[in-house]
Image: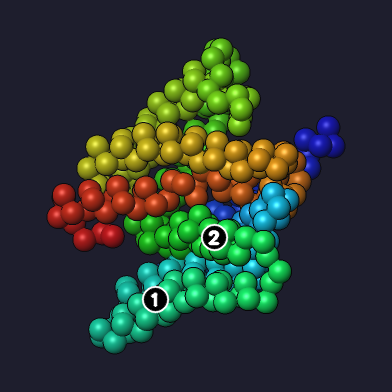
Amino acid sequence: MKTFWIRTASALVYAVLFLGSIFMGRITGNNELGIIVLAFFGAFVASGCAIEYYRIAELGGNHPSRYLGIVLTAMTTLAMALFADWADSAQSDIIVLIAFTIMGLIVFLSVPCALMAQLWRDSQNPFGDVLHTLLPVIYCAIPLGLMTWLNDNGILPVCVLLVWGNDSFAYIGGSLVGKHKMWPKHSPGKTWEGTAIGVVCCMAIAYFVGPLFNSQYPMIAWIVLGLICGVVGTLGDLVESMLKRSVGLKDSGNIMPGHGGFLDRFDSLLMILPFAFVIMFLFSLITNTNIL
């Protein structure tokens, strides 16, 4: 019983912080404040994910430049997220130019900085360690940096709801009718039946809930988003399980008692957000709407 209450309390804190960051702009009526809060929440989560990734990489015998990577991950997330505010409020091209310059410096200088950092480290595989140093920037920072863009158009809260719905219905469906293991090597509990039920429910949730957040997108766009979230979200969970099991870990961390770490909680969303951005951007072009 004690474990149940601990799990419930930590899940509640997580939900309040995440949903509070997502809806801060709507609650306060201040869009800029909402973007800033969500940007810093994303940078906090990205940093936590990077810390956990470097721990896993080190357990696997690698030696990434941990502190440099954490800084690059946090700065990339912030630069991408805050650029949504800069671009939206820009009164002249110079502001957009400055924003692009800051993002470019972070992205393009990250590789030479990571390479030069290896000169002071006793590494047997310096270039492999550079790749491990930079992977969280791609795996964590870029997806989380897209949150402010997707939140402005109501896509982010739908994606979060789809992730939670997919996890819940896939678990329930798998428990009731699941017989065929989907990927026993990386996630013994997942079944094809449960995954199929989760994907179908994702599409249904997107169909009914999506237009409530943004009616400018055609219904087919939300259905496709639901399909992608169900499939890609499941694969994202499997990728993170593969990462943990490569070094014999059950959880990536313990930031949330009873639920694991940052990567455990955001594994599906990290994979979904880039796909969601591309899909909805394409539908914006098709429907000739300027909403991304």
Residue 82's place in the image compared with 135, above or below, is below
Question: Which kind of residue does numbered mark 1 sit on?
Answer: Gly
Most distant residue in the right direction: 2
Q: CA distance from mark 1 to mark 2?
A: 19 Å
Which residue does the numbered mark 2 point to in the structure image?
A: 131
The x, y position of residue 15, in whole percent, is 61, 49
Q: Is residue 101 something one can see in this rendering?
A: yes
Please give the name of the residue rendered at 29% of the width and 87% of the height, measured from the top-left corner.
94
Q: Is residue 94 above or below residue 199?
A: below
Which quadrant of the structure image shows residue 264? Answer: top right
The label number, if any, that marks residue 1 in the structure image: none
Count residues near mark 1 (Cα–Cα under 10 Å), then give few for <14, some for 14-19, many for 20+. some
The answer to whether 114 appears left or right of 278 in the picture is right
Packing grade of label 2 (10 A; few <14, some 14-19, many >=20) is: some
Q: Position of residue 209 (x, y in %)?
A: 38, 40
Colour convention = rainbow
Quarter of the rendering containing residue 227? top left
Please state which of residues 170 and 27 is positioned toward the viewer in this rendering: 170
Q: Is residue 250 above or below residue 269?
A: above
Sooner in the amino-acid sequence: mark 1 or mark 2: 1
- Secondary structure of the residue carrying tag 2 is helix
Q: Position of residue 138 (x, y in %)?
A: 48, 59
Residue under the point 44% across and 68% down:
81
Which one is nearer the viewer's eye here, 251 or 292? 251
Pointer 1 with pointer 2, Cβ within 8 A: no
Left or right of residue 230, residue 6 in this image: right
User: Which of the image's four quarters has the C terminus?
Assistant: bottom left
Pair 1/2: label in front: 2
Q: Circle 1 is placed at which residue position?
A: 104
Q: Quadrant of the N terminus?
A: top right
Residue 39 point in image, percent of width and height: 50, 67
For the residue pair 140 and 18, the one nearer the viewer reads as 140
